[in-house]
Amino acid sequence: RLHDVVGSNVVTGPIIEQSFEQVCRLLEAHLHCGHAFLLGSRPSAADFALFGQLHPMISLDPETSRRVFAASRSVWFWYHSLKDLSGYSLQEEGVGWFEPDNLPSTLVALFTEVGRLYAPFMQANASAVAAGKKDFSCLLDNGTVLWKQASFKYQAKCLNWLREQYCLLLAADKQAVDRVLANTGCAAMFQQQPSSSKL
Protein backbone atom coordinates (compact mmCIF):
# COMPACT_ATOMS: atom_id res chain seq x y z
CA ARG A 1 0.00 0.00 0.00
CA LEU A 2 2.88 2.37 0.75
CA HIS A 3 4.10 1.80 -2.79
CA ASP A 4 0.91 3.39 -4.10
CA VAL A 5 1.53 6.50 -1.98
CA VAL A 6 5.20 7.16 -2.72
CA GLY A 7 5.13 5.94 -6.33
CA SER A 8 7.62 3.11 -5.91
CA ASN A 9 6.67 -0.10 -7.71
CA VAL A 10 8.25 -2.70 -9.99
CA VAL A 11 8.24 -0.23 -12.90
CA THR A 12 9.45 2.88 -11.08
CA GLY A 13 11.70 1.39 -8.38
CA PRO A 14 14.86 1.06 -10.50
CA ILE A 15 14.31 4.55 -11.96
CA ILE A 16 14.05 6.06 -8.48
CA GLU A 17 17.24 4.37 -7.31
CA GLN A 18 19.20 5.34 -10.43
CA SER A 19 18.05 8.95 -10.24
CA PHE A 20 18.90 9.17 -6.55
CA GLU A 21 22.42 7.93 -7.21
CA GLN A 22 22.71 10.47 -10.02
CA VAL A 23 21.57 13.28 -7.71
CA CYS A 24 24.20 12.19 -5.19
CA ARG A 25 26.89 12.32 -7.87
CA LEU A 26 25.77 15.76 -9.06
CA LEU A 27 25.53 17.15 -5.54
CA GLU A 28 28.97 15.74 -4.75
CA ALA A 29 30.40 17.50 -7.80
CA HIS A 30 28.78 20.75 -6.61
CA LEU A 31 30.28 20.37 -3.13
CA HIS A 32 33.69 19.43 -4.48
CA CYS A 33 33.78 22.71 -6.41
CA GLY A 34 33.83 24.50 -3.07
CA HIS A 35 30.15 25.34 -2.80
CA ALA A 36 29.03 24.71 0.78
CA PHE A 37 25.34 25.04 -0.09
CA LEU A 38 23.08 24.66 -3.11
CA LEU A 39 22.46 28.31 -3.94
CA GLY A 40 25.60 29.99 -2.66
CA SER A 41 27.77 30.37 0.42
CA ARG A 42 24.78 30.41 2.74
CA PRO A 43 22.00 27.90 3.45
CA SER A 44 18.57 28.26 1.89
CA ALA A 45 15.20 26.54 1.96
CA ALA A 46 16.51 24.34 -0.88
CA ASP A 47 19.26 22.94 1.36
CA PHE A 48 16.83 22.22 4.18
CA ALA A 49 14.35 20.61 1.78
CA LEU A 50 17.05 18.23 0.57
CA PHE A 51 18.14 17.69 4.16
CA GLY A 52 14.57 16.63 4.97
CA GLN A 53 14.64 14.01 2.22
CA LEU A 54 18.04 12.69 3.32
CA HIS A 55 17.20 12.60 7.02
CA PRO A 56 15.12 9.39 7.16
CA MET A 57 17.48 7.70 4.74
CA ILE A 58 20.61 8.47 6.75
CA SER A 59 19.48 8.76 10.36
CA LEU A 60 16.53 6.39 10.60
CA ASP A 61 17.55 3.37 8.52
CA PRO A 62 21.05 1.82 8.73
CA GLU A 63 20.68 0.07 5.36
CA THR A 64 19.73 3.19 3.39
CA SER A 65 22.37 5.14 5.32
CA ARG A 66 24.98 2.72 4.03
CA ARG A 67 23.61 3.11 0.50
CA VAL A 68 23.83 6.90 0.65
CA PHE A 69 27.38 6.59 1.98
CA ALA A 70 28.25 4.26 -0.89
CA ALA A 71 26.72 6.61 -3.44
CA SER A 72 28.56 9.64 -2.06
CA ARG A 73 30.51 10.06 1.14
CA SER A 74 30.50 13.81 0.55
CA VAL A 75 26.70 13.96 0.51
CA TRP A 76 26.54 11.79 3.64
CA PHE A 77 28.87 14.13 5.53
CA TRP A 78 27.16 17.23 4.08
CA TYR A 79 23.88 16.02 5.58
CA HIS A 80 25.52 15.73 8.99
CA SER A 81 27.03 19.21 8.68
CA LEU A 82 23.53 20.61 8.10
CA LYS A 83 22.19 19.02 11.27
CA ASP A 84 23.61 21.85 13.37
CA LEU A 85 24.14 25.27 11.84
CA SER A 86 23.51 27.08 15.12
CA GLY A 87 26.90 28.80 14.96
CA TYR A 88 26.48 29.93 11.36
CA SER A 89 26.06 33.70 11.28
CA LEU A 90 24.16 35.53 8.54
CA GLN A 91 24.76 39.25 8.74
CA GLU A 92 22.85 40.33 5.64
CA GLU A 93 19.94 38.62 3.92
CA GLY A 94 21.02 39.64 0.44
CA VAL A 95 24.61 38.39 0.70
CA GLY A 96 25.92 34.94 -0.17
CA TRP A 97 23.71 34.00 -3.12
CA PHE A 98 24.91 33.01 -6.56
CA GLU A 99 24.26 35.60 -9.25
CA PRO A 100 21.30 34.33 -11.34
CA ASP A 101 23.11 35.05 -14.62
CA ASN A 102 26.31 33.36 -13.47
CA LEU A 103 25.27 30.08 -11.89
CA PRO A 104 27.86 27.32 -11.52
CA SER A 105 27.48 24.52 -14.03
CA THR A 106 27.16 22.07 -11.14
CA LEU A 107 23.92 23.73 -10.01
CA VAL A 108 22.54 23.83 -13.55
CA ALA A 109 23.27 20.09 -13.78
CA LEU A 110 21.10 19.50 -10.71
CA PHE A 111 18.28 21.53 -12.25
CA THR A 112 18.62 19.47 -15.42
CA GLU A 113 18.27 16.23 -13.46
CA VAL A 114 15.08 17.60 -11.90
CA GLY A 115 13.82 18.55 -15.35
CA ARG A 116 14.70 15.14 -16.78
CA LEU A 117 12.41 13.09 -14.53
CA TYR A 118 10.64 15.06 -11.82
CA ALA A 119 9.24 17.97 -13.81
CA PRO A 120 7.39 15.85 -16.40
CA PHE A 121 6.16 13.57 -13.63
CA MET A 122 4.76 16.55 -11.69
CA GLN A 123 2.91 17.78 -14.77
CA ALA A 124 1.46 14.36 -15.62
CA ASN A 125 0.40 13.79 -12.02
CA ALA A 126 -1.31 17.20 -11.82
CA SER A 127 -3.18 16.49 -15.05
CA ALA A 128 -4.31 13.11 -13.70
CA VAL A 129 -5.53 14.66 -10.45
CA ALA A 130 -7.40 17.40 -12.35
CA ALA A 131 -9.06 14.72 -14.50
CA GLY A 132 -10.02 12.65 -11.45
CA LYS A 133 -7.85 9.70 -12.46
CA LYS A 134 -6.68 7.35 -9.72
CA ASP A 135 -3.70 6.11 -11.72
CA PHE A 136 -1.64 7.49 -14.56
CA SER A 137 1.32 6.69 -16.74
CA CYS A 138 3.68 9.00 -18.58
CA LEU A 139 7.00 9.12 -20.37
CA LEU A 140 9.96 10.88 -18.74
CA ASP A 141 13.45 11.81 -19.92
CA ASN A 142 12.38 12.90 -23.41
CA GLY A 143 10.10 9.91 -23.81
CA THR A 144 12.66 7.23 -22.93
CA VAL A 145 11.45 6.28 -19.43
CA LEU A 146 8.02 4.81 -18.69
CA TRP A 147 6.47 5.82 -15.36
CA LYS A 148 3.31 4.38 -13.76
CA GLN A 149 1.80 5.13 -10.38
CA ALA A 150 -1.29 6.22 -8.46
CA SER A 151 -2.07 9.93 -8.74
CA PHE A 152 -1.05 11.99 -5.70
CA LYS A 153 -3.07 15.07 -4.74
CA TYR A 154 -0.42 16.57 -2.48
CA GLN A 155 2.15 16.73 -5.27
CA ALA A 156 -0.45 18.37 -7.51
CA LYS A 157 -0.92 20.98 -4.79
CA CYS A 158 2.82 21.49 -4.59
CA LEU A 159 3.03 22.18 -8.32
CA ASN A 160 0.13 24.59 -8.06
CA TRP A 161 1.88 26.45 -5.22
CA LEU A 162 5.03 26.74 -7.33
CA ARG A 163 3.01 28.14 -10.21
CA GLU A 164 1.29 30.64 -7.91
CA GLN A 165 4.63 31.88 -6.57
CA TYR A 166 6.01 32.15 -10.11
CA CYS A 167 3.04 34.27 -11.16
CA LEU A 168 3.64 36.63 -8.22
CA LEU A 169 7.19 37.41 -9.33
CA LEU A 170 8.01 40.83 -10.72
CA ALA A 171 8.61 40.84 -14.47
CA ALA A 172 12.39 41.19 -14.09
CA ASP A 173 12.55 38.38 -11.54
CA LYS A 174 10.40 36.15 -13.72
CA GLN A 175 12.73 36.74 -16.64
CA ALA A 176 15.70 35.81 -14.43
CA VAL A 177 13.99 32.56 -13.44
CA ASP A 178 13.22 31.82 -17.08
CA ARG A 179 16.87 32.31 -18.03
CA VAL A 180 18.05 30.06 -15.19
CA LEU A 181 15.66 27.25 -16.07
CA ALA A 182 16.01 27.48 -19.84
CA ASN A 183 17.15 24.18 -21.36
CA THR A 184 16.89 22.35 -18.01
CA GLY A 185 13.39 20.91 -18.52
CA CYS A 186 12.12 22.65 -15.37
CA ALA A 187 10.59 25.64 -17.15
CA ALA A 188 7.80 23.44 -18.51
CA MET A 189 6.26 23.31 -15.04
CA PHE A 190 5.45 27.03 -15.28
CA GLN A 191 3.95 27.12 -18.76
CA GLN A 192 0.46 26.60 -17.35
CA GLN A 193 -1.39 28.97 -15.04
CA PRO A 194 -2.08 27.81 -11.46
CA SER A 195 -5.43 26.15 -10.87
CA SER A 196 -8.08 28.13 -9.01
CA SER A 197 -9.93 24.97 -7.93
CA LYS A 198 -9.25 23.20 -4.64
CA LEU A 199 -7.28 20.00 -5.12
Image (cartoon, rainbow, N blue to C red):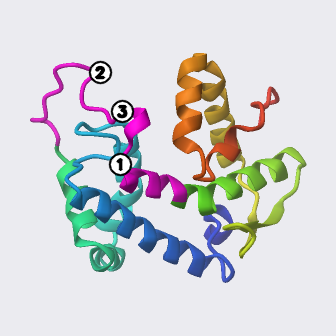
**Residue 190 x %, y %:** 69, 38
From the top left corner, tell me how far across and down residue 59 is, in percent. 28, 64
Quadrant of residue 9 in the image? Answer: bottom right
Q: Is residue 195 magenta?
A: no
Q: Where's residue 6, x and y in %?
A: 61, 63
Marking on residue 94:
2
Residue 99, numbered label: 3
Confirm whether the magenta stretch covers residue 101. yes
Badge 2: residue crowd in 10 Å (few <14, some 14–19, many ≥20): few
Residue found 63% across the figure and 53% down from its top: 185
The quarter of the rendered structure image containing the C terminus is: top right
**Quarter of the picture holding the N terminus:** bottom right
The secondary element bearing badge 3 is classed as loop
What stretch of residues is rendered in magenta? Answer: 85-112
The kind of residue tagged 3 is Glu
Name the residue carrying label 1: 104
Mark 2 and mark 3: span between their CA atoms?
11 Å
